[in-house]
Image (cartoon, rainbow, N blue to C red):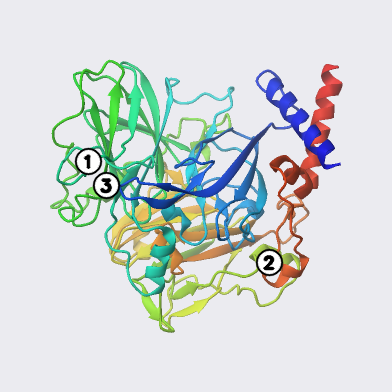
Amino acid sequence: MALLGVSLFSLFSLVHIALLPSLCFAADPYAFYDLHVSYITASPLGVPQQVIAVNEKFPGPVINSTTNYNVVVNVWNDLDEDLLMTWPGIQMRRNSWQDGLLGTNCPIHPKRNWTYQFQVKDQIGSYFYFPSLNFQRASGGFGPFIINNREIIDIPFAEPDGDIFIMIGDWYTRNHTALRSALDAGNNLGMPDGVLINGKGPYRYNTTLVPDGIQYETVQVDPGKTYRVRVHNVGVSTCLNFRIQNHFLTLAETEGFYTVQQNFTDLDIHVGQSYSFLVTMDQNASSDYYIVASARFVNESLWQRVTGVAVLHYSNSKGPATGPLPDPPNDFYDKSRPINQALSIRQNVSASGARPNPQGSFHYGTINVTETYVLKTVPPVLINGTLRATLNGISFVKPATPIRLADQYKVKGEYKLDFPNKPLNRTLRLDRSVINATYKGFIEVIFQNNDTVVQSFHMDGYSFFVVGFDFGEWTEDSRSRYNKWDAIARSTTQVFPGAWTAVLVSLDNTGVWNIRTENLDRWYLGQETYMRIVNPEENGETEMAAPGNVLYCGALQYLSKEPNTTSSAASVLRGNSKLYFTLLVELFALIYTFC
């Protein structure tokens, strides 16, 4: 029976792949991926260390999809600890069961696999995936995830001559287990050992700062062509300034929304953020050019070695890149520069996104706000003798039983619906406190950063309008400075130290969704919570049921059945009978149509 199932699955895959380019399906198409997550030994900064690879690649392979596709990703855990893969920015409409965080999923145990299935409904853009547990992203496990426009929807620029994927991030030569042990011991992580570009160390632009023998990234291009350069900051905690020597970066898209196109010589990319630039290869080929990602908002004279350098190589280049790197931003005397740059990123309200209507036609600035949440961060503190980070005085304790699963099985005491909507003057505490959000509410969220470091905040399941930034404490008078017409929508925003960022979001996606800092150290120490959004008139249409292959843990461990791991196709069929039935129906429909 298992062999028959695998054969049918293989037959379906072959038929589907063969017909996909030329057929118009009644149902939305499927895209299938297998991701094997394992350890390999690599030396990105010249020191052999254990990194996390996906399909033996570091970074992992591109997941390439198209608007409205059903994406099926079979994740194999070949690590020695639990694993979950998450997909930040992918909105998982009505389907937080697939989000890949402990608040929504039980972990995939070592030597086991689990199949995610979700639809990239009404989305386009540039994203990435990464492992969400145990500080693992600090050792790798990440890769690009792109969602292309359907052919019937125009993009608001000429079709590029190619895609270039660039993953930047600060990097430690200690692996993730050593880093989290340092945090557990109450220590900070200290200065990173470098910055990687596509999993590789810096080109030797400086013989003192960069040792010999380090492998670096080379990006091959042809003169005169324009490329879509998709850049993702997948690092631990450091904002990086991205620039390409002598080339303009024409900003075109960020995390699924087209921007007003403007030229930058450099752009600050904060942890967890993704951008698309159009870059035209319009320089002479007398030599190669530097691609640089350097640390921001730190003592740059001390952090000189925390610089990533790759090489842009024209096909007719006459020599290697030489000389000093292009200058970083000089804003020592202009503290407003980073905020002004952030405010300059605005939405292209005349462009269509995933749908034929312009994405800016949603007039968010005229909608009444139903509730305001002020989420305040402070530097980590000792709670019960342990170093912890907080939101509104609460350091989140990861649930043993996923929140929505606890709801379904009426498990009591797993969490509380009492997260405060503003900072309270009370003792800091450990808790599993969740926001009881109102379905179809339109909320205002203020991220107030009273910590000493710049942070990124992310909201799963949603994109939000970033309407304001400023230094100091947010007050109700701050609303007079909001952008209420063409603020960019995205899922990850920066919050400067001693400053606030305001966002507006429409709560139309039911489920349980994580709000967190993307700074891995603060996240690991508890700086997160969840929004629980339930339709009180739920009729099966606004939220999907738990998948057929749902994992059980915590209070529901007794329901768990150990899966077999004989083959990826067999696991999809055995672990998700609903998917198996869907595939068979689509296969037979195709056979009926064309036979």
Query: Disc 2 to disc 1, how far (Cα)?
Result: 49 Å
**In the depicted view, which residue is nearer to us: 300 or 9?**
9
Q: Which residue is mark 3?
A: 340
**Which quarter of the rendering shows the N terminus?**
top right
Which corner quadrant of the image does residue 522 belong to?
A: bottom left
Residue holding disc 1: 212
Dot 2 falls on a residue whose secondary structure is loop
First-in-chain label (3 vs 1):
1
Neighbours of disc 3 within 10 Å: few (<14), some (14-19), many (20+): few
Snapshot quadrant of residue 524: bottom left
Q: Position of residue 485 (x, y in %)?
A: 42, 43
Q: Is residue 457 visible?
A: yes
- Mark 2: amino acid: Cys
Left or right: where does residue 13 sit relative to residue 218?
right
Query: Looking at numbered disc 3 in the image, what kind of residue is underneath it?
Result: Asn
| Residue identifier under label 2 | 553
Mark 2 or 1, closer to the camera: 1
Tag 3 secondary structure: helix
Q: How many marks?
A: 3
The residue at 65%/68% (across/down) is 401
Q: Amino acid at mark 1?
A: Asp
* Marked residue nearer the N-terminal end (2 or 1): 1
**Residue 565 in picture, x, y percent from top left:** 71, 49
Q: Nearer the viewer, mark 3 or mark 1?
A: 1
- Label 1 sits on a secondary structure element that is loop
